[in-house]
Image (cartoon, rainbow, N blue to C red):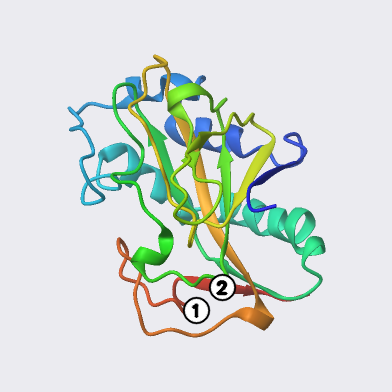
Amino acid sequence: MLTHKISYDTERFDFKRLIQKHYGVENLTQIDKWLNEEVPFFEDMTFDQSTDIHKHFYKIYDNDEFLSLYRLFLKEILQPGYGEALVYQAKPTFRVHLPNNVAVGDWHKDGDYNHQRTETNYWLPFTKAFGNNTIWIESEEDKGDYQAYDVEYGEVLVFKGSYLKHGNKPNDTGVCRVSVDFRVIPFSEYKQLEEQSSNLKLKFQIGSYYDLLEV
């Protein structure tokens, strides 16, 4: 199955609490109230990681609490399904789907941006993802039959973003969707590449874009 969901315990892995604390807000669906700037519509990927709300999120990595919980999540929830060492995205990518906007600037395959086909994408919303504030994914490569996936906090959407085209529609739900996503490769299928990620310009290598999780 190319796209499916798995569940996890939000009391043990309470990512939402850490993000709410980081922004000083009680309700992530209204995180747009935190903004003091006018955010343009994300026509392409040039701007969808450049707002103040994104820049502030990445400061969460200055304190290891979030990354420690992330690595524990990988170890306890994901690694048992692989049974081997994992190469994983060292720092998850933050997305906020603001009302009347999109979270990602275009419909794309990650492979269009140098990602390896052996990657698996994990998409973790920290608010209920539904309707036009969630992600839309095609069922098979180049089929173009996009489907919206409703995902609750405590669920992870798993899909092959390297070759399944995906994206967003303008958010008409009136509330924000907040999420992170990251990519994992079984160590046995990992290839060290010289190509770089599109936003951070990190090489697709362990110690740069990726880290290694031993068994």
Name the residue located 51 percent from the left edge and 30 percent from the top edge: 20
Q: Is residue 67 left or right of residue 164?
A: right
For label 2, the crowd category at 10 Å Cα-Cα, with few meaning under 14, some 14 to 19 and many 20 or more, is some
Against 63, residue 162 (above or below) is below
13 or 148: nearer the viewer: 148
Question: Is the C terminus in the top left, top right, bottom left or bottom right quadrant?
Answer: bottom right
Asked if marks 1 and 2 touch (Cβ < 8 Å), the reply is yes
192 or 126: nearer the viewer: 192
Name the residue located 57 percent from the left edge and 25 percent from the top edge: 128
Against 81, residue 173 (above or below) is above
The numbered mark at residue 163 is none
Q: Secondary structure at mark 1?
A: loop
198 or 158: nearer the viewer: 158
Q: Position of residue 11 (x, y in %)?
A: 75, 34
Name the residue located 49 percent from the left edge and 85 percent from the top edge: 192
Q: CA distance from mark 1 to mark 2?
A: 6 Å
Against 88, residue 178 (above or below) is above
Q: Is residue 50 left or right of residue 208?
A: left
Question: Which residue in the protein does label 1 denote?
Answer: 207
The numbered mark at residue 211 is 2
Q: Position of residue 87 (x, y in %)?
A: 61, 73
Q: Position of residue 181 (x, y in %)?
A: 51, 50
For label 1, the crowd category at 10 Å Cα-Cα, with few meaning under 14, some 14 to 19 and many 20 or more, is few
Give the residue type at disc 1. Gly
Q: Position of residue 141 (x, y in %)?
A: 50, 57
